[in-house]
């Protein structure tokens, strides 16, 4: 199986249309999809794979392999299928004034392309297909040689792996700062959704809820940071939290006054997430 370089391609992604515009393809993968007879939205939807995530009512993810040619080489890819949102989800999002995206696959595709254009490394897009209203499918290249940030900060001892931990925390902070400086918010910004490569570079995944600049506000910045603080609460040291804030401020460019306000709000958000989590356990 072919592997990928650690340096992910960044910059604007050139796309081509197929199937009357219902299928959008990263031009770098057009020949590969043609070779694998994935020339329509329906064909992409029907691509067979193996489950890698618990299937939800609105989406599910499978791993599949695409042939590169006659030599038997293949690349790993992930197929994420989106289903129409139930009516109750519409109502819940409207009441809570949360952004929601009826065309989930296309929104995540647009988010991935926007991150690449902004120079923020993430998943590599291959194709997206619109099957019918609310029903779509996203195909991305598999990321190899990674660990989740949530696992590393638990496994790496602060005494024995201090230098690596500090470098990782700094990289997470710079990612968060760069993302917010570009006025993107993740909305699910937990350590489990941060993939760490061998060189300790950090890639955010699961971009299906990204808030774009036209809707970005302090609320979404605080939510992202609160989620991150909550997930780091049991595994990060005070020194690492302090380093995170210092690097975040440098990367995002907010003022000292804003830093204090956002820090306090993020800490309260993290505490609220913790209380909610404990209620669910009870």
Image (cartoon, helix red, strand yellow):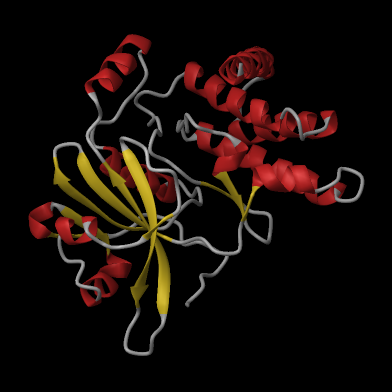
Image position, residue 268 (x, y; %): 64, 12
Q: Quadrant of the C terminus?
A: top right
Compared to residue 167, the image places residue 240 above or below, namely above
Left or right of residue 271, residue 212 in this image: left
Examine the image and state in which quarter residue 98 appears.
top left
Left or right of residue 248, residue 219 in this image: left
Q: Residue at x 65, y 25 (%)?
A: 230
Q: Determine the residue located farthest toward the front in the rendered image.
A: 282
Image position, residue 79 (x, y; %): 34, 55
Q: Residue at x 40, y 77 (%)?
A: 74
Compared to residue 110, the image places residue 184 above or below, namely above
Q: Determine the residue located farthest toward the right in the rendered image.
A: 159
Image position, residue 253 (x, y; %): 61, 29
Q: Residue at x 52, y 37 (%)?
A: 179
Q: Determine the residue located farthest toward the top in the rendered image.
A: 95
Compared to residue 19, the image places residue 252 above or below, namely above
Left or right of residue 229, residue 123 in this image: left
Examine the image and state in which quarter residue 85 appears.
top left
Q: Residue at x 32, y 68 (%)?
A: 28
Seen from the viewer's position, the closer of residues 220 and 55 is 55
Seen from the viewer's position, the closer of residues 107 and 175 is 107
Image position, residue 182 (x, y; %): 47, 35
Q: Determine the residue located farthest toward the left in the rendered image.
A: 20
Examine the image and state in which quarter residue 6 appears.
bottom right
């Amino acid at each position: 199986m072919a592997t990928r370089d650690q340096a992910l391609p960044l910059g604007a992604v050139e796309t081509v249309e197929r199937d009357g515009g219902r299928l959008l393809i990263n031009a770098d993968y057009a020949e590969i999809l043609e070779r694998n007879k994935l020339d329509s939205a329906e064909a992409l939807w029907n691509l067979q794979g193996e489950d890698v995530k618990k299937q939800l009512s609105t989406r599910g993810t499978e791993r599949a392999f695409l042939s590169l040619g006659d030599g038997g080489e293949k690349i790993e890819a992930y197929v994420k299928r989106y289903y129409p949102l139930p009516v109750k989800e519409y109502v819940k999002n409207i009441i809570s004034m949360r952004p929601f995206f009826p065309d989930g696959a296309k929104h995540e595709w647009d988010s991935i392309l926007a991150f690449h254009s902004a120079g923020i490394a993430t998943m590599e897009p291959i194709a997206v297909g619109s099957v019918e209203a609310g029903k779509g499918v996203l195909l991305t290249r598999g990321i190899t040689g990674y660990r989740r940030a949530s696992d590393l900060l638990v496994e790496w001892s602060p005494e024995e792996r201090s230098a690596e931990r500090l470098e990782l925390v700094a990289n997470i902070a710079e990612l968060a700062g760069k993302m917010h400086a570009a006025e993107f918010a993740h909305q699910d910004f937990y350590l489990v959704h941060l993939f760490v490569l061998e060189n300790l570079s950090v890639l955010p995944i699961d971009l299906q809820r990204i808030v774009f600049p036209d809707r970005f506000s302090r609320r979404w910045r605080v939510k992202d940071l609160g989620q991150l603080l909550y997930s780091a609460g049991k595994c990060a040291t005070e020194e690492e939290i302090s380093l995170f804030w210092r690097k975040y401020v440098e990367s995002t460019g907010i003022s000292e006054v804003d830093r204090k306000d956002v820090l306090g709000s993020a800490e309260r958000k993290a505490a609220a997430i913790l209380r909610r989590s404990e209620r669910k356990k009870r």
